[in-house]
Image: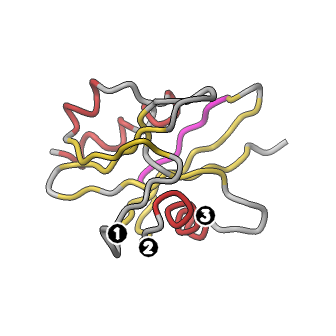
C-alpha cells in the first residue's frame, strides 16, 4: 500500500519561520508544527496546502517549490510528508486548530516541542535560515 500523503507549508520571512501550536488534545496536542495536513483523494499537494491554510487560518497563500519530503509512521500507517515553500497573501490569521502562532528563527525553533514528523524537516530548513 502506498504511503498516505501529507503536506506542510513553510513560510520564511526575514530569517524567521511561521509556526503554529496545536490545540490541546490528541496525539499532537500542544505541539508546534508547520501547518498543513492530509491531502484528500484527487487533490494535488498545492491544492491541499491552499485548502488547509484556508481551513486552519482563513488566510490565502501561494505555494512555491518543494523543499523536501520525509516519511513517518502514525498509528501504524506510513505517511509521506511533503514540505513546500508558501507565501502569505494576507495577514489576518483566524486560529481554528491552533492556540497560537509565531515567527521564529531556526535556533529558537530547535528548542520548541515540535511534532516529530515536522522536526524531521529541519534538515531541509537549516540552510534556508542562514
As drawn, 61 above or below 82: below
Circles 1 and 2: CB distance less than 8 Å?
A: yes
Magenta residues, start to end:
67-73
How crowded pointer 1 is (Cα within 10 Å; few <14, some 14-19, many 20+) is rated as some
Of the two numbered discs 3 and 1 on the same chain, state the one appearing first in sequence: 3
Disc 2, SS = loop
Q: Position of residue 79 (x, y in %)?
A: 67, 39
Check residue 88 in the rendering and tell me which mark sits there, or answer none: 1
* Residue at the spot 38% in from the left edge and 25% down from the top edge: 113
Q: Does 13 sit left or right of 29 as displayed?
A: left
Residue 122 numbered mark, or none: none
Q: Position of residue 126 (x, y in %)?
A: 26, 39
Figure quadrant of the C terminus: top left
What kind of element bears circle 3?
Answer: helix
Residue 69 painted magenta: yes
Residue identifier under label 3: 48
> Where is residue 61 shown, x and y percent of the image?
42, 71
Q: Main secondary structure of the magenta part?
A: strand
Q: Which residue is mark 2?
A: 60
Say which quarter of the image contains residue 27. top right
Q: Earlier in the sequence, mark 2 or mark 3?
A: 3
Give the x, y percent position of residue 48: 61, 64
For the residues bearing labels 2 and 3, Cβ distance under 8 angstroms: no
- Mark 2 to mark 3: distance in Å? 12 Å
Amino acid at each position: 500500500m502506498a504511503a498516505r500523503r501529507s503536506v506542510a507549508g513553510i513560510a520564511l520571512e526575514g530569517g524567521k519561520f511561521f509556526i503554529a501550536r496545536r490545540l490541546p488534545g490528541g496525539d499532537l496536542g500542544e505541539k508546534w508544527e508547520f501547518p498543513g495536513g492530509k491531502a484528500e483523494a484527487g487533490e494535488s499537494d498545492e491544492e491541499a496546502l491552499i485548502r488547509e491554510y484556508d481551513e486552519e487560518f482563513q488566510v490565502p497563500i501561494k505555494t512555491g517549490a518543494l523543499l523536501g519530503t520525509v516519511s513517518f509512521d502514525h498509528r501504524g500507517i506510513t505517511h509521506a510528508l511533503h514540505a513546500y515553500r508558501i507565501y502569505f497573501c494576507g495577514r489576518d490569521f483566524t486560529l481554528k486548530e491552533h492556540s497560537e502562532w509565531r515567527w521564529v528563527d531556526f535556533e529558537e525553533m530547535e528548542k520548541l516541542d515540535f511534532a516529530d514528523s515536522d522536526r524531521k524537516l529541519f534538515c531541509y530548513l537549516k540552510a534556508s535560515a542562514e
